[in-house]
Image (cartoon, helix red, strand yellow):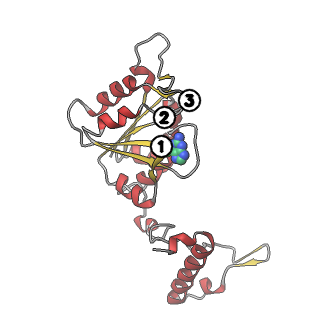
Amino acid sequence: MRIDIVTIFPEFFSVLDISLLGKARQAGIIDVVAHDLRAFTHDRHRTVDDTPYGGGAGMVMKPEPWGEAIDSIVGPAASEALLVVPSPAGEPFTQAVARELGAEQHLVFACGRYEGIDQRVSDHYATRMRVRAISLGDYVLNGGEVAVMAMIEAAGRLVPGVVGNPESLVEESHEDGLLEYPSYTKPSVWRDLEVPPVLLSGNHGAVAAWRREQQLERTRRVRPELLDG
Ligand code: 6GU
C-alpha cells in the first residue's frame, strides 16, 4: 500500500518510523511519504491561506498549492488513488471505514488547517478520482494531522502482514459490532483483586460464554446505541 500525506507539518509524521507501522514500512508492506504543502507555493512568504469570501472568522487554505501538490502525486489523468480529506464535516470514521481504507492500493491524505481547504479542491478532484471527507468524531481538532495519524494506524494494521498474528485482529472492539471483553493475565490475585474464576477453569465453552456476556453487558452500559441495529 502506498500512502501520501500533504500537510504543512510533514515532520509530524516522523512518528510513523517507529512501532508496528514502522516495521511495516521497513518490510516494504506500506510506503508512506509526507509532502510539505509549502513546497508547492511560489511566493516569498510561501502563503497557503487567505481570508474567506463572504467574510467570517479564520482563514481558508488556498486551492492552488493543493492542486499542484495533489497533481504531483496522482499524475495528470484519472487516478486509481483515493483522496481522503479529514474534516469534522465528513462522514464518521468507523472500523468499517478503516477496513475499506485498508483495502486500497493508494491513499492520498490532504491535511487542512485553519477553517479548512477551499471547497473547489474536493470538487475538482471528485471529477478525476474518488474523494471521501472523513471525520474522527464530533469534536474539533486544529488540523487534520492527528486525525490522519489515527486513520493510518487503524487502516494500516488491517493490511495483511502488518499485524504479526492475524487472529489478534478478530476478537477486538468493533470487529463484531460489540465492545471487547475485559482481559486478564498473571498474577491471579493482584491487590486483593481476583481474576474471574471461570478464566482459570480450563472450560473453553464456559470461557467463551462468559466473554460474550461481558461484551454484551459492557456494550449495553457504555455504548447502548451499538445494540440498536
Ligand atoms: Cl478529520 N479534522 C479536524 N480538523 N477536526 C476533526 C476531525 C478531523 N475529526 C474530528 N474533528
Disc 2 C-beta below 8 A from ligand 1? yes
The secondary structure type at the circle numbered 2 is loop
In the foreground, 54 or 147: 54
Residue 141 in percent (x, y) is at 58, 42
Residue at mark 2 to residue at mark 1: CA–CA distance: 8 Å
Residue at mark 1 to residue at mark 3: CA–CA distance: 19 Å
The answer to the question of whether label 3 and label 2 lie on touching residues, with beta carbons closer than 8 A, is no
> Which numbered disc, 2 or 1, marks the residue that appears first in the sequence?
1
Residue that label 2 marks = 116
The answer to the question of whether label 2 and label 1 lie on touching residues, with beta carbons closer than 8 A, is yes
Residue that label 1 marks = 87
Q: Which mark is residue 23?
A: none
Residue that label 3 marks = 56
Using the rendered image of the protein, determine whether residue 140 is visible from the camera's viewpoint: yes
In the foreground, 28 or 84: 84
- Residue 164: image quadrant is bottom left
